[in-house]
Image (tube, rainbow, N blue to C red):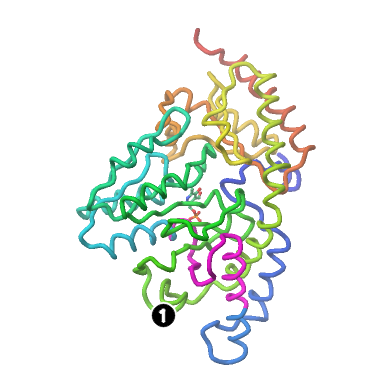
Amino acid sequence: MKTDDEIIYLDNNSSTRIDPEVLEEMMPFLTERYGNPSSAHRFGRQVKDATKLAHERLAALLGCQPNEVVFTSGGTESDNTALHSALQMTPDRRHIVTTSVEHNAVLNYCQTVVSQGCEVTTLEVDDEGHLDLAELERAIRPDTAVVSVMWANNETGVINPLDEIAAICRAKGVALHTDAVQTVGKMPIDLAGKYLQFLSLSGHKLHASKGVGALYVNRNSKFHPMIVGGPQEGGRRAGTDNVASIVGLGKAAELAASTLEEENTRVRALRDRFEETLLAQVEDVAVNGDRAKRLPNTSNVAFLGVDAQAILIKLDQEGVCCSLGSSCTTGAVEPSHVLRAMHMTNERARSSLRFSFGRFNTEAELDRVLEILPRIVSKLRQLAPAAG
Ligand code: PLP
Protein backbone atom coordinates (compact mmCIF):
# COMPACT_ATOMS: atom_id res chain seq x y z
CA MET A 1 0.00 0.00 0.00
CA LYS A 2 1.15 3.53 -0.74
CA THR A 3 1.59 6.08 2.01
CA ASP A 4 -0.55 9.24 1.92
CA ASP A 5 2.47 11.18 0.63
CA GLU A 6 2.63 8.97 -2.45
CA ILE A 7 -1.04 9.37 -3.32
CA ILE A 8 -1.87 10.76 -6.74
CA TYR A 9 -5.16 12.51 -6.20
CA LEU A 10 -7.33 12.72 -9.31
CA ASP A 11 -10.63 13.12 -7.49
CA ASN A 12 -10.83 16.89 -7.14
CA ASN A 13 -14.53 17.02 -8.09
CA SER A 14 -15.25 14.96 -4.97
CA SER A 15 -13.22 17.19 -2.70
CA THR A 16 -10.03 19.20 -2.75
CA ARG A 17 -7.06 19.58 -0.48
CA ILE A 18 -7.27 22.69 1.74
CA ASP A 19 -4.79 25.17 0.35
CA PRO A 20 -2.04 25.89 2.94
CA GLU A 21 -2.76 29.62 2.63
CA VAL A 22 -6.43 28.95 3.41
CA LEU A 23 -5.53 26.89 6.45
CA GLU A 24 -3.21 29.61 7.68
CA GLU A 25 -6.04 32.16 7.61
CA MET A 26 -8.42 29.75 9.35
CA MET A 27 -6.17 28.78 12.23
CA PRO A 28 -6.52 31.91 14.43
CA PHE A 29 -10.30 31.45 14.38
CA LEU A 30 -9.94 27.88 15.65
CA THR A 31 -7.61 29.00 18.43
CA GLU A 32 -7.24 32.44 19.97
CA ARG A 33 -9.98 34.32 18.02
CA TYR A 34 -12.94 32.37 19.35
CA GLY A 35 -15.33 35.29 19.85
CA ASN A 36 -18.87 35.15 18.49
CA PRO A 37 -19.21 37.55 15.55
CA SER A 38 -22.62 38.61 16.87
CA SER A 39 -21.13 39.82 20.18
CA ALA A 40 -21.02 43.56 20.76
CA HIS A 41 -17.53 43.61 22.32
CA ARG A 42 -14.26 44.23 20.54
CA PHE A 43 -13.34 40.54 20.59
CA GLY A 44 -16.53 39.71 18.71
CA ARG A 45 -16.16 42.66 16.35
CA GLN A 46 -12.74 41.44 15.20
CA VAL A 47 -14.32 38.16 14.20
CA LYS A 48 -17.22 39.98 12.53
CA ASP A 49 -14.69 41.96 10.48
CA ALA A 50 -13.15 38.69 9.29
CA THR A 51 -16.49 37.29 8.14
CA LYS A 52 -17.24 40.63 6.45
CA LEU A 53 -13.99 40.30 4.51
CA ALA A 54 -15.01 36.77 3.49
CA HIS A 55 -18.27 38.16 2.04
CA GLU A 56 -16.25 40.74 0.10
CA ARG A 57 -13.75 38.21 -1.25
CA LEU A 58 -16.39 35.76 -2.38
CA ALA A 59 -18.43 38.57 -3.92
CA ALA A 60 -15.33 39.69 -5.85
CA LEU A 61 -14.93 36.19 -7.31
CA LEU A 62 -18.59 36.05 -8.32
CA GLY A 63 -18.92 39.64 -9.52
CA CYS A 64 -21.74 40.41 -7.10
CA GLN A 65 -22.35 42.52 -3.98
CA PRO A 66 -21.07 41.26 -0.57
CA ASN A 67 -24.62 41.32 0.83
CA GLU A 68 -25.75 38.98 -1.94
CA VAL A 69 -23.60 36.21 -0.42
CA VAL A 70 -25.20 34.03 2.26
CA PHE A 71 -22.86 31.53 3.92
CA THR A 72 -24.31 28.05 4.43
CA SER A 73 -23.11 24.59 5.44
CA GLY A 74 -22.32 23.61 1.84
CA GLY A 75 -23.64 22.93 -1.62
CA THR A 76 -26.47 20.69 -0.44
CA GLU A 77 -27.90 23.30 1.93
CA SER A 78 -27.53 26.01 -0.71
CA ASP A 79 -29.40 23.93 -3.30
CA ASN A 80 -32.16 23.03 -0.83
CA THR A 81 -32.47 26.64 0.35
CA ALA A 82 -32.77 28.09 -3.15
CA LEU A 83 -35.60 25.73 -4.08
CA HIS A 84 -37.27 26.10 -0.68
CA SER A 85 -37.14 29.88 -0.93
CA ALA A 86 -38.57 29.94 -4.46
CA LEU A 87 -41.49 27.73 -3.45
CA GLN A 88 -42.20 29.68 -0.27
CA MET A 89 -42.15 33.06 -1.98
CA THR A 90 -44.66 32.06 -4.64
CA PRO A 91 -47.28 29.93 -2.87
CA ASP A 92 -49.49 29.94 -5.97
CA ARG A 93 -46.70 28.33 -8.01
CA ARG A 94 -46.14 24.64 -7.27
CA HIS A 95 -44.02 23.51 -10.21
CA ILE A 96 -40.24 23.13 -10.60
CA VAL A 97 -38.29 22.54 -13.82
CA THR A 98 -34.97 20.76 -13.46
CA THR A 99 -32.77 18.27 -15.33
CA SER A 100 -32.06 14.57 -15.11
CA VAL A 101 -28.32 15.13 -14.54
CA GLU A 102 -28.53 17.35 -11.43
CA HIS A 103 -26.83 16.42 -8.19
CA ASN A 104 -28.98 14.55 -5.68
CA ALA A 105 -29.05 17.72 -3.56
CA VAL A 106 -31.49 19.05 -6.16
CA LEU A 107 -33.10 15.80 -7.38
CA ASN A 108 -33.91 14.45 -3.93
CA TYR A 109 -35.19 17.83 -2.76
CA CYS A 110 -37.54 17.77 -5.75
CA GLN A 111 -38.69 14.26 -4.85
CA THR A 112 -39.48 15.46 -1.34
CA VAL A 113 -41.64 18.35 -2.52
CA VAL A 114 -43.44 16.07 -4.98
CA SER A 115 -44.59 14.06 -1.98
CA GLN A 116 -45.94 17.35 -0.60
CA GLY A 117 -48.04 18.07 -3.67
CA CYS A 118 -45.62 19.93 -5.98
CA GLU A 119 -44.95 18.92 -9.56
CA VAL A 120 -41.51 18.58 -11.11
CA THR A 121 -40.58 18.43 -14.80
CA THR A 122 -37.21 16.73 -15.24
CA LEU A 123 -35.66 17.56 -18.59
CA GLU A 124 -33.71 14.92 -20.51
CA VAL A 125 -30.24 15.48 -21.97
CA ASP A 126 -28.75 14.18 -25.22
CA ASP A 127 -25.88 11.67 -25.62
CA GLU A 128 -23.35 14.44 -25.04
CA GLY A 129 -25.02 15.67 -21.88
CA HIS A 130 -26.74 18.75 -23.33
CA LEU A 131 -30.24 20.06 -22.72
CA ASP A 132 -32.70 20.90 -25.47
CA LEU A 133 -33.41 24.58 -24.80
CA ALA A 134 -36.65 24.54 -26.80
CA GLU A 135 -37.83 21.78 -24.49
CA LEU A 136 -36.82 23.86 -21.48
CA GLU A 137 -38.87 26.75 -22.80
CA ARG A 138 -41.89 24.50 -23.36
CA ALA A 139 -41.57 23.02 -19.87
CA ILE A 140 -42.01 26.38 -18.10
CA ARG A 141 -45.64 26.90 -17.06
CA PRO A 142 -47.52 29.81 -15.50
CA ASP A 143 -47.28 27.97 -12.16
CA THR A 144 -43.52 27.32 -12.40
CA ALA A 145 -41.84 28.64 -9.26
CA VAL A 146 -38.22 28.05 -10.29
CA VAL A 147 -35.98 26.54 -12.96
CA SER A 148 -32.96 24.76 -11.46
CA VAL A 149 -30.20 23.88 -13.94
CA MET A 150 -26.63 23.13 -12.92
CA TRP A 151 -23.92 25.24 -14.52
CA ALA A 152 -21.48 22.36 -15.00
CA ASN A 153 -21.95 18.69 -14.32
CA ASN A 154 -19.93 17.07 -11.54
CA GLU A 155 -19.46 13.74 -13.34
CA THR A 156 -18.76 14.76 -16.92
CA GLY A 157 -17.86 18.45 -16.58
CA VAL A 158 -20.34 19.31 -19.36
CA ILE A 159 -21.27 23.01 -19.20
CA ASN A 160 -24.80 24.32 -19.67
CA PRO A 161 -25.34 27.61 -21.59
CA LEU A 162 -26.44 29.61 -18.56
CA ASP A 163 -26.92 32.90 -20.43
CA GLU A 164 -29.29 31.30 -22.93
CA ILE A 165 -31.16 29.55 -20.13
CA ALA A 166 -31.38 32.85 -18.24
CA ALA A 167 -32.79 34.59 -21.32
CA ILE A 168 -35.58 32.01 -21.51
CA CYS A 169 -36.35 32.33 -17.78
CA ARG A 170 -36.34 36.12 -17.98
CA ALA A 171 -38.79 36.09 -20.90
CA LYS A 172 -41.06 33.71 -19.01
CA GLY A 173 -40.74 35.66 -15.74
CA VAL A 174 -39.58 32.66 -13.75
CA ALA A 175 -36.81 32.48 -11.13
CA LEU A 176 -33.55 30.71 -12.05
CA HIS A 177 -31.29 28.77 -9.71
CA THR A 178 -27.98 27.28 -10.77
CA ASP A 179 -25.90 24.73 -8.92
CA ALA A 180 -22.40 26.11 -9.57
CA VAL A 181 -20.68 23.85 -7.04
CA GLN A 182 -18.33 22.53 -9.74
CA THR A 183 -18.04 25.79 -11.66
CA VAL A 184 -16.82 28.26 -9.05
CA GLY A 185 -13.04 28.37 -9.11
CA LYS A 186 -12.83 26.54 -12.44
CA MET A 187 -14.43 29.09 -14.75
CA PRO A 188 -14.62 32.89 -14.65
CA ILE A 189 -17.98 34.04 -13.27
CA ASP A 190 -19.46 37.52 -13.48
CA LEU A 191 -22.93 37.80 -12.04
CA ALA A 192 -23.19 41.57 -12.49
CA GLY A 193 -26.29 42.27 -14.56
CA LYS A 194 -27.09 38.57 -15.03
CA TYR A 195 -30.63 37.30 -14.82
CA LEU A 196 -30.11 34.81 -12.01
CA GLN A 197 -31.83 34.63 -8.65
CA PHE A 198 -29.79 31.94 -6.85
CA LEU A 199 -26.39 30.28 -7.26
CA SER A 200 -25.00 27.51 -5.03
CA LEU A 201 -21.35 26.84 -4.26
CA SER A 202 -19.37 24.69 -1.88
CA GLY A 203 -16.09 25.37 -0.06
CA HIS A 204 -14.50 21.96 -0.26
CA LYS A 205 -14.59 21.96 -4.07
CA LEU A 206 -12.30 24.98 -4.21
CA HIS A 207 -9.62 24.24 -1.63
CA ALA A 208 -11.51 25.46 1.44
CA SER A 209 -12.88 23.19 4.16
CA LYS A 210 -15.84 20.83 4.14
CA GLY A 211 -19.13 21.89 5.72
CA VAL A 212 -19.13 25.43 4.38
CA GLY A 213 -20.66 26.86 1.24
CA ALA A 214 -22.63 29.83 0.07
CA LEU A 215 -25.81 30.79 -1.69
CA TYR A 216 -25.82 33.85 -3.92
CA VAL A 217 -29.17 35.56 -3.57
CA ASN A 218 -29.80 38.32 -6.10
CA ARG A 219 -30.53 41.51 -4.17
CA ASN A 220 -33.68 42.09 -6.22
CA SER A 221 -35.12 38.67 -5.58
CA LYS A 222 -37.41 37.75 -2.76
CA PHE A 223 -36.05 35.35 -0.21
CA HIS A 224 -37.45 33.04 2.42
CA PRO A 225 -34.93 31.37 4.77
CA MET A 226 -34.89 27.63 5.27
CA ILE A 227 -33.09 27.72 8.64
CA VAL A 228 -34.67 30.17 11.06
CA GLY A 229 -33.48 31.45 14.42
CA GLY A 230 -31.04 34.30 15.01
CA PRO A 231 -30.40 37.24 12.66
CA GLN A 232 -27.15 35.94 11.14
CA GLU A 233 -26.41 36.47 7.43
CA GLY A 234 -28.91 39.33 7.30
CA GLY A 235 -31.66 37.06 8.61
CA ARG A 236 -31.24 34.71 5.67
CA ARG A 237 -29.47 31.83 7.43
CA ALA A 238 -29.73 31.53 11.18
CA GLY A 239 -27.12 29.93 13.43
CA THR A 240 -23.78 31.12 14.79
CA ASP A 241 -21.39 31.49 11.88
CA ASN A 242 -18.91 28.70 11.16
CA VAL A 243 -16.29 31.43 11.35
CA ALA A 244 -13.05 29.58 10.59
CA SER A 245 -14.56 27.87 7.57
CA ILE A 246 -16.18 31.08 6.31
CA VAL A 247 -12.84 32.89 6.63
CA GLY A 248 -11.21 29.98 4.78
CA LEU A 249 -13.77 30.09 1.98
CA GLY A 250 -13.14 33.82 1.60
CA LYS A 251 -9.41 33.19 1.23
CA ALA A 252 -10.06 30.28 -1.15
CA ALA A 253 -12.16 32.61 -3.29
CA GLU A 254 -9.34 35.14 -3.42
CA LEU A 255 -6.87 32.41 -4.41
CA ALA A 256 -9.29 31.00 -6.99
CA ALA A 257 -9.48 34.39 -8.68
CA SER A 258 -5.72 34.39 -9.09
CA THR A 259 -5.46 30.73 -10.23
CA LEU A 260 -8.34 30.72 -12.73
CA GLU A 261 -5.95 31.36 -15.57
CA GLU A 262 -3.85 28.40 -14.48
CA GLU A 263 -6.91 26.18 -14.15
CA ASN A 264 -7.71 26.96 -17.75
CA THR A 265 -4.23 26.40 -19.09
CA ARG A 266 -1.99 24.14 -17.00
CA VAL A 267 -4.75 21.95 -15.50
CA ARG A 268 -6.54 21.77 -18.85
CA ALA A 269 -3.28 20.71 -20.53
CA LEU A 270 -2.80 17.93 -17.96
CA ARG A 271 -6.35 16.69 -18.53
CA ASP A 272 -5.99 16.86 -22.31
CA ARG A 273 -2.66 15.02 -22.32
CA PHE A 274 -4.25 12.36 -20.13
CA GLU A 275 -7.09 11.81 -22.58
CA GLU A 276 -5.02 12.06 -25.76
CA THR A 277 -2.56 9.48 -24.45
CA LEU A 278 -5.28 7.06 -23.37
CA LEU A 279 -7.12 7.41 -26.67
CA ALA A 280 -3.91 6.80 -28.60
CA GLN A 281 -2.51 3.97 -26.51
CA VAL A 282 -5.42 2.02 -25.08
CA GLU A 283 -7.96 0.22 -27.23
CA ASP A 284 -11.69 0.75 -26.81
CA VAL A 285 -11.53 3.89 -24.77
CA ALA A 286 -14.15 6.64 -25.10
CA VAL A 287 -14.59 9.99 -23.43
CA ASN A 288 -18.08 10.55 -22.02
CA GLY A 289 -19.78 13.91 -22.61
CA ASP A 290 -19.16 16.82 -24.96
CA ARG A 291 -15.39 17.30 -24.97
CA ALA A 292 -15.56 20.88 -26.19
CA LYS A 293 -18.04 22.43 -23.76
CA ARG A 294 -16.55 21.04 -20.59
CA LEU A 295 -14.83 22.09 -17.38
CA PRO A 296 -11.06 22.20 -17.91
CA ASN A 297 -10.29 19.67 -15.18
CA THR A 298 -12.78 16.84 -15.68
CA SER A 299 -12.41 13.65 -17.67
CA ASN A 300 -15.00 10.88 -17.66
CA VAL A 301 -13.65 7.87 -19.52
CA ALA A 302 -15.21 4.54 -20.51
CA PHE A 303 -12.86 1.55 -20.71
CA LEU A 304 -15.23 -0.52 -22.79
CA GLY A 305 -15.69 -4.09 -21.68
CA VAL A 306 -13.83 -3.61 -18.39
CA ASP A 307 -15.46 -3.28 -14.97
CA ALA A 308 -14.60 0.24 -13.78
CA GLN A 309 -14.78 -0.84 -10.17
CA ALA A 310 -11.98 -3.34 -10.77
CA ILE A 311 -9.85 -0.61 -12.36
CA LEU A 312 -10.58 1.72 -9.46
CA ILE A 313 -9.49 -0.88 -6.90
CA LYS A 314 -6.25 -1.61 -8.77
CA LEU A 315 -5.54 2.12 -9.18
CA ASP A 316 -6.19 2.58 -5.48
CA GLN A 317 -3.66 -0.14 -4.68
CA GLU A 318 -1.11 1.80 -6.74
CA GLY A 319 -1.98 5.05 -4.93
CA VAL A 320 -4.10 6.66 -7.64
CA CYS A 321 -7.47 8.09 -6.55
CA CYS A 322 -10.34 8.58 -8.98
CA SER A 323 -14.11 8.10 -8.91
CA LEU A 324 -16.61 5.63 -10.25
CA GLY A 325 -19.13 6.96 -12.74
CA SER A 326 -21.61 5.17 -10.57
CA SER A 327 -22.80 5.31 -7.03
CA CYS A 328 -22.48 2.55 -4.53
CA THR A 329 -25.53 1.96 -2.40
CA THR A 330 -25.75 -0.95 0.04
CA GLY A 331 -22.88 -2.70 -1.69
CA ALA A 332 -24.52 -2.84 -5.14
CA VAL A 333 -22.96 -0.65 -7.81
CA GLU A 334 -25.69 1.31 -9.55
CA PRO A 335 -24.76 2.86 -12.90
CA SER A 336 -24.50 6.63 -12.58
CA HIS A 337 -27.81 8.46 -13.12
CA VAL A 338 -25.88 11.06 -15.13
CA LEU A 339 -24.41 8.56 -17.60
CA ARG A 340 -27.71 6.70 -17.83
CA ALA A 341 -29.48 10.01 -18.57
CA MET A 342 -27.01 10.41 -21.47
CA HIS A 343 -28.51 7.20 -22.90
CA MET A 344 -25.48 5.09 -22.13
CA THR A 345 -25.90 1.37 -21.76
CA ASN A 346 -25.50 0.02 -18.23
CA GLU A 347 -22.42 -1.79 -19.51
CA ARG A 348 -20.72 1.39 -20.73
CA ALA A 349 -21.72 3.29 -17.59
CA ARG A 350 -20.26 0.49 -15.47
CA SER A 351 -16.97 0.72 -17.39
CA SER A 352 -16.62 4.48 -16.76
CA LEU A 353 -14.36 6.34 -14.37
CA ARG A 354 -14.09 10.03 -13.54
CA PHE A 355 -10.68 11.63 -13.25
CA SER A 356 -10.71 15.20 -11.97
CA PHE A 357 -7.49 17.17 -11.96
CA GLY A 358 -6.57 20.12 -9.78
CA ARG A 359 -4.15 22.79 -8.67
CA PHE A 360 -1.78 20.40 -6.94
CA ASN A 361 -1.39 17.80 -9.71
CA THR A 362 1.94 17.67 -11.54
CA GLU A 363 3.27 16.48 -14.90
CA ALA A 364 5.28 13.81 -13.05
CA GLU A 365 2.08 12.47 -11.46
CA LEU A 366 0.43 12.34 -14.85
CA ASP A 367 3.42 10.43 -16.31
CA ARG A 368 3.04 7.90 -13.53
CA VAL A 369 -0.72 7.50 -14.05
CA LEU A 370 -0.22 7.05 -17.78
CA GLU A 371 2.20 4.26 -17.03
CA ILE A 372 -0.05 2.53 -14.44
CA LEU A 373 -3.52 2.89 -15.96
CA PRO A 374 -2.95 1.31 -19.43
CA ARG A 375 -1.15 -1.59 -17.72
CA ILE A 376 -4.09 -2.20 -15.36
CA VAL A 377 -6.67 -2.04 -18.15
CA SER A 378 -4.68 -4.42 -20.33
CA LYS A 379 -4.24 -6.92 -17.45
CA LEU A 380 -7.95 -6.84 -16.64
CA ARG A 381 -8.78 -7.38 -20.30
CA GLN A 382 -6.48 -10.40 -20.42
CA LEU A 383 -8.14 -11.85 -17.31
CA ALA A 384 -11.67 -11.36 -18.60
CA PRO A 385 -11.72 -10.77 -22.34
CA ALA A 386 -14.86 -8.95 -23.43
CA ALA A 387 -17.54 -11.26 -24.82
CA GLY A 388 -17.36 -11.27 -28.61
N1 PLP B 1 -23.84 19.93 -6.27
C1 PLP B 1 -22.85 19.40 -6.98
C2 PLP B 1 -22.82 19.59 -8.45
C3 PLP B 1 -21.84 18.67 -6.34
O1 PLP B 1 -20.85 18.14 -7.07
C4 PLP B 1 -21.91 18.51 -4.93
C5 PLP B 1 -20.88 17.70 -4.23
O2 PLP B 1 -20.41 16.70 -4.74
C6 PLP B 1 -22.97 19.11 -4.23
C7 PLP B 1 -23.92 19.81 -4.93
C8 PLP B 1 -23.06 19.01 -2.74
O3 PLP B 1 -22.14 19.86 -2.12
P1 PLP B 1 -21.73 19.64 -0.58
O4 PLP B 1 -20.85 18.42 -0.55
O5 PLP B 1 -20.99 20.87 -0.19
O6 PLP B 1 -23.00 19.49 0.20
* 331 on left or right of 247: left
Classify the position of the N terminus by image quarter: top right
Q: Residue at x 68, y 32 (%)?
A: 272
Secondary structure of the residue carrying tag 1 is loop
Identify whether 340 is placed above or below 163. Answer: above
Decide: is 45 above or below 198.
below
The residue tagged 1 is 230
Residue at x-position 61% and y-position 43%: 11
Is 181 included in the stretch rendered in magenta?
Answer: no
Quick one: 39 or 3, which is closer to the camera? 39
Residue 69: x, y in percent?
Answer: 50, 67
Local crowd size for mark 1, using a 10 Å CA cut-off: few (<14), some (14–19), many (≥20): some
Residue stretch rendered in magenta on the structure: 50-77
- In the image, 214 versus 89, the foreground residue is 89
Residue 273 quadrant = top right
Front position in the image: 190 or 209: 190
Residue most extreme to the bottom = 41
Horizontal side of 3 relative to 118 (left or right) equals right
